[in-house]
Amino acid sequence: MKYKIGIDVGGTFTDFLLFGDDGSNEIYKVLSTPDDPSIATISGIELMAREHGTGTAEFLKSVSTVVHGTTVTTNAVLTGSGARTALLTTKGFRDALEMRRGIREEQYNNFYRNAKPLVERWLRWPVEERVAWDGREIEPMSETDVSAALDLFKAEGVEAVALCFMNSFANPSHETAARNMTREAMPDAYVTASVDILPSIRFYDRVSTTALNSYVGPILSRYLKALIRRLADLKFGGVLLIMQSNGGVVSPEIACDRAAMTLLSGPAGGPVAGIAYAADQKWDDCITIDMGGTSFDASLVKDRQPFVTTVGDISRLRLALPMLDVVTIGAGGGSIGWLDEGGLLRMGPQSAGAKPGPSCYARGGTYPTCTDADLVLGYLAADFFAGGRMKLDLAAAEKAILEKIAKPMGLDLVEAAAGMYRVINTNMSSAVREVAVQHGQDPRDFPLIVAGGAGPNHACMIALELEMPILIVPRESSIFCAAGMLMSDLKHDFVQTYATTLDSADPARFRAVFENMKAEGLRLLLSEGIAEDRIRYVHALDLRYVQQYHEVSVEIPAKEVEAADWKAMASRFHPKHNALFGYSLEEEGAQVELINMRLTCIGVTEKPSFPARQYHGPDPSEAFKNERQVFLPKKGAFEKLKVYDGAKLRFGNFIEGPVVIEQVNTTTFVTPEYDVLVDRFGSYTLFPKGKRTEIEGRVL
Amino acid sequence: MSVEIDKILVSILQRRFRSIAEEMSIALAMTTRSPILCEARDFVTGLYDADGKMLEQKENLPILSFSLGPVCEYIVKFFGKRNIHEGDVIFHNDVFSMGNQNNDVAVYKPIFHGRTLVGWSACKGHQADIGGAVRGGYNPSAVEVWQEALRIPPVKVYEKGKLRKDVWNLIFANIRLKMVEEDMKAQVGSCVVGERGLRALVEKYGFERFNAHKKYLFDATEKMMRAEISRIPKGVYRGEATGYFDGRNKGSKYTVRVKITVKGDSIHFDYSDTDTQTKGFVNGTFTSSASATVLTFLQMVDPNIPHNDGMVRPIRITIPGGTVLNASYPAATTYGNHLCPINANAIQRALAGAIPDKVTAGWNELLCSLSTGQDQRRKKPYVDIFFMGLKGGSGAVKGCDGYDHIGMIDASGGVLDQDYEMFELQTPHTLVRHEYLPDSAGAGKWRGGLGAVSEYVMGGEGNKLVTFGEGDVEPARGAHGGGEGTLNYIELDYPDGRKYRTTSKDLVENVPSGTFYRQEAGGGGGWGSPHERPAELVAREVRNGITSEAKARAEYGVALKPGTFEVDETETARLRRNIRA
């Protein structure tokens, strides 16, 4: 048998999904090792080998593909531990990186500090040179300035250099000349020229993205080299792929050149997985949520396409590479409950994390957290956390909630815990609602795909608040992103600014820009071993009305590109603008302006498919486990509920809510409003009582 | 009260109010066309109770913090509750009935539960045109409101769900740009989003429960605010600040004087001694001035206090009519929001001694320019508000340096620089420099925020430059021994060698292509003795080129070893001893 492995490194756990070519699949989790994440990665592989009764090298022989999502770059930025980085930039503009366009996010807080720049000012070195908006040279580049800077960088032990010159997207010659000088003078340094990673207009976006890439480039390169070496030592002969923020995967070699593409890759597997699980039940749209220990991610999928954005931030620094539009808030199992000065209860965004963790982890934490509340309310069982491998301390949870929340508020223990549960659910449902509104959508039209260790215990309350019709809890919900990674295609995004009114664009230049991007994409994909007939190209243009400030990205079919059919392209823009912003200026004959040309090159990979199981009938009694007291929020009281063992549930099983379903890494609390039907892949479909027939039509 | 209070529900309602106000804000940002709305986000959205008391507000710029509530209360009184119906939509901008600025046009939509008026959703945005003598509404030569704007006292444009086409047409027949009509439709849309959200909440919990819990929320918030006020030693505090040049008379000035009385857990801002109004457009309205007061004070208290009626209850503001902060009918008032920096200075100066831990040193005051003309590349007119040039530094506070390049306190970092390359695409100008201005920050144990220097070469034809603001006479003051920031100025070097330094409220016509524009936005004031700033930090700032060696020595008493960026400990100790003695 051949296997594929999806590996997702999280803040607390590293998740593994092992997928056999016969459709069998297994879930593994090991504690993450933040100091060197490859240790957890390898120990997870060793664990899988052990469980399969073979040596690691022997086991790896049967593994064809490893898809790996890494957060080393993310952590380097969050903790300020990236490479020692310098910047070469046009004289007169050395502070753009630090100014961040002059924003202060907390306007009433005079103690709020600016984000620390990735490159200190004295290492942001100005170069005499200038190119105009249309690419004309205004002033030649001073090689003397560049050389002087490089001497300084070398003397100061700079490991990485970023280059970003004004208007280089329109004429890269100065920037590339300086880049070549840098590579020659500093052969060991990691060098990023802005035109190599983001040749598009908007100086701050470009300089920030370029600096980020250089800042994390050496970190990712070192990490991947170590990982490849370890795998090579174990005689791994398969393919290693790396997850990117755009929801696609890439070879480690290319990942190293475009390290910033991994910065927000953590939650990027989510929407990809959501599409697959929703499709299983014939849904084209869905909202995915993923509630882990610290954060809550939400994203929206429409017509089986996740939304992509180029306006991202990490640690308040702009990242303008294409990434899946995932909204993250500070809400998770570790979220801490606290009282504000008016005595009102709030939850998060601070989290107790894995260390010291919730009070009930008994690792020295004394904060009342969401997990503590879940335990007190009976949503978690003290003796079945992580499948019983970790015993939870109920008394510690009670003590924390009683002292920090209940007593100051004049509530009893259960009222306080129930309050914490409600407040964090409100925070999450507000985030989901905002995701929907942001895209002009109504959450009531979407099924909710629920993921993350803590997600299924809270999802019903979120869905009820938002009146969402259906919840789907995938059997693999606790390792959702790892599953998404195995379902991802190879993907490379390219952009080039060509600023012109659309109908006066030069067809030859227009086609040439796309051809160049395409040639580069093809080269990369072939280097990743994908067959040419599995390659797809998606053309898009960023368009706007003349004098507008924001562009709308519009997909254009290849034949309109080939024909340089400006009219057809514009007629795709107007309705999209109308859909997004409520009006179009088509009738007024307003001129359309082209800003960026984009090409996405996709290498379609072979996806694992979960095996459909045999229909087993509605009776779930074989999976019955026990009964316990569980708090029903609406009723405001405990009730004895049945608990089922999720591992033993079969296709077609029907369970009436309220009920609790336990799996090793997650527990699903089904409120009285819902019933459950198990689908052919073992996922739970939660639906409002009375809709059984309708749902059976979809699921069975 | 028969309803039992569920404290958790109070938290939930507060979170939902905030969320709805934010959804209204997202909806509006996505549907408006004017860059001042969708780019600069010069708008506010909010929910109010049946009496017009603020439930929650999302003000994208702090100067709008207090701009919707007073009008809502006015509208309720004006129509009387019995004449307010489901489906009504009310427009308003009139500065003589609690409006804050002529161009800020508000939409109010009453929300009903059954037949009961349960609340309002409202939003207000800066419109690209509002009639008056000059396109855009910015008319430095105005002396009366009609030269500035079309006045819209509360008027129903929809009644019981039906569009009053005649009223609608009357309004938009007096406004130049079609865009404004579209943007006002977007504002109505935003109110519908708010209406749906609030109505759903009332339906879910019932009006009585909703009301009781709302009251509890107001009380809890009030308690937070009162707790903050109680920390201010009781007493009477006075402060004043002066602005210069009313746009008409050379050497003219106007002074804001505030008397702040802190009594137990309430605070009163009394502006009775403030100078009388000017004859031009340098005048405030009650609402814009009160917003300035509120936003300045909010920066001195816990930023987590929810923005609802409870927050403002303990605050009383008296601004007599006829003063420069509350000009009497029919004065011109377009400059009103730009009086915020002076007002803020007066308040900070008054309270600096009472709550030294909370009050910042002086902020750089706004000086802004706007250029218009013909872009010969496109054969089209261009217009640019030079945001990146106007943003100076904030004042330092005990424990924290000022924020660099943040801009005027009315926005507090909410208005962003244009992107450089987009600027060169959208205007015919060529940028030469936009960087921190070295030595602009007031020295201190905590230094002021740095100002910025901006330079560009004008392109285009028939260029006109308009300036407005302050900060070219008095620099941002230091506090508790901190140094002052630098001054603002805008200077033009004409191709023929002439130099011209603009006034703070200027109109410069026929600026030829090739003119070199230079602007300095000054730094903020420092806090505490510069000698107490760690010498290593000063040395690092010298290395970073934002503090000169000369200033390090003269003001910070820090000497570096020659040819290095290392602190010369002996010399520094000597300097610091000497200056202290």
Image (cartoon, coloured by chain):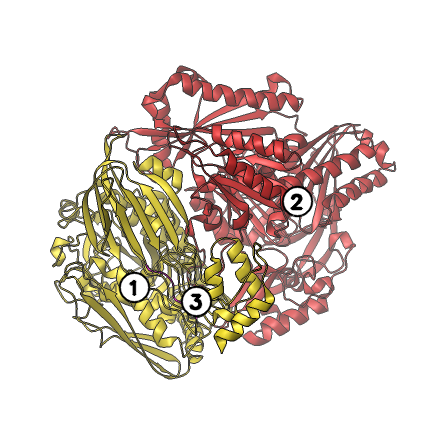
- Choose between A384 and B115: the one closer to the eye: A384
Q: Which chain is tinted red? A: A
Distance from the alpha carbon under mark 1 to that under mark 3: 20 Å
Q: On the image, which quarter does residue B477 sit in?
A: bottom left
Label 3: chain? B
In the rendered image, is residue B29 in sight? Answer: yes
As helix, strand or loop, the secondary structure at mark 2 comes to: helix
In the rendering, at what x and y percent does residue B265 appear?
A: 40, 80
Q: Which chain is tinted yellow? A: B
In the rendering, at what x and y percent does residue B301 appear?
A: 43, 70
Label 2: chain? A
Q: Which residue is mark 3?
A: B526
Prevailing secondary structure class for the magenta stretch in the rendered image? loop
Q: Residue at x 22, y 73 (%)?
A: B274
In the rendered image, is residue B41 in sight? Answer: no
Proximity of marks 2 and 3: CB atoms separated by less than 8 Å: no
Disc 3 crowd, CA 10 A, few/some/many (<14, 14-19, 20+): many
Image depth: mark 1 or mark 3 in front: 3
Q: Residue at x 53, y 61 (%)?
A: B538
Label 1: chain? B
What's the magenta region?
A: B482-487
Distance from the alpha carbon under mark 2 to that under mark 3: 39 Å
The answer to if B485 sits in the magenta stretch is yes
- Choose between A85 and A224: the one closer to the eye: A85
